[in-house]
Image: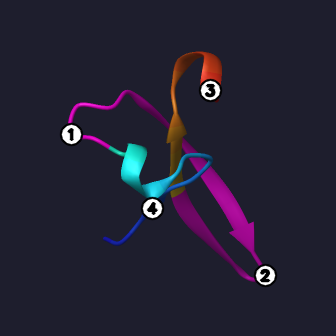
Amino acid sequence: MMSRVEQIAPDEVKIGLAVSAHIKQTGDSALLVFVPAGDRA
């Protein structure tokens, strides 16, 4: 499964980063995306 982390610069993504999962509607399908958990979400 492919996904991505949104609402954060690519160079700020680190292993162990706490994230929350969200489902983003894209036309007739849905995409699982992650956003930083906590104050940034």
What numbered label is drawn on residue 4?
Answer: 4
| Disc 2 residue crowd, few under 14, some 14–19, many 20+, Cα 10 Å | few
Give the mark, 4 or 2, whose residue is nearer the N terminus. 4
- Residue ranking furthest to the top: 39
Mark 3 and mark 4: span between their CA atoms? 16 Å
Q: Mark 2 — residue?
A: 27
Of tags 3 and 4, the one toward the viewer is 3
What type is the residue that disc 2 sits on?
Gly
Mark 4 and mark 1: span between their CA atoms? 13 Å
What type is the residue that disc 1 sits on?
Ile
**Could you say which quadrant of the image residue 38 lies in?**
top right
* Secondary element type, mark 2: loop
**Residue 6 drawn at (x, y percent):** 57, 53
Quarter holding the C terminus is: top right
**Residue 25 drawn at (x, y percent):** 73, 66
- Residue ranking furthest to the left: 15
- Relative to 37, say whether 13 is above or below: below
Do callouts 4 and 2 mark residues in contact (Cβ within 8 Å)? Answer: no
Do callouts 3 and 4 mark residues in contact (Cβ within 8 Å)? Answer: no
At a point 52% along the width and 52% down the height, the residue shown is: 9
Do callouts 2 and 3 mark residues in contact (Cβ within 8 Å)? Answer: no
Q: Mark 1 — residue?
A: 15
39 within the magenta span: no
Give the mark, 1 or 2, whose residue is nearer the N terminus. 1
Give the mark, 3 or 4, whose residue is nearer the N terminus. 4
| Span of residues in magenta | 14-32
Give the mark, 4 or 1, whose residue is nearer the N terminus. 4
Q: Is residue 21 left or right of residue 41?
A: left
Q: Mark 3 — residue?
A: 40
**Residue 1 drawn at (x, y percent):** 31, 71
At a point 62% along the width and 47% down the height, the residue shown is: 7
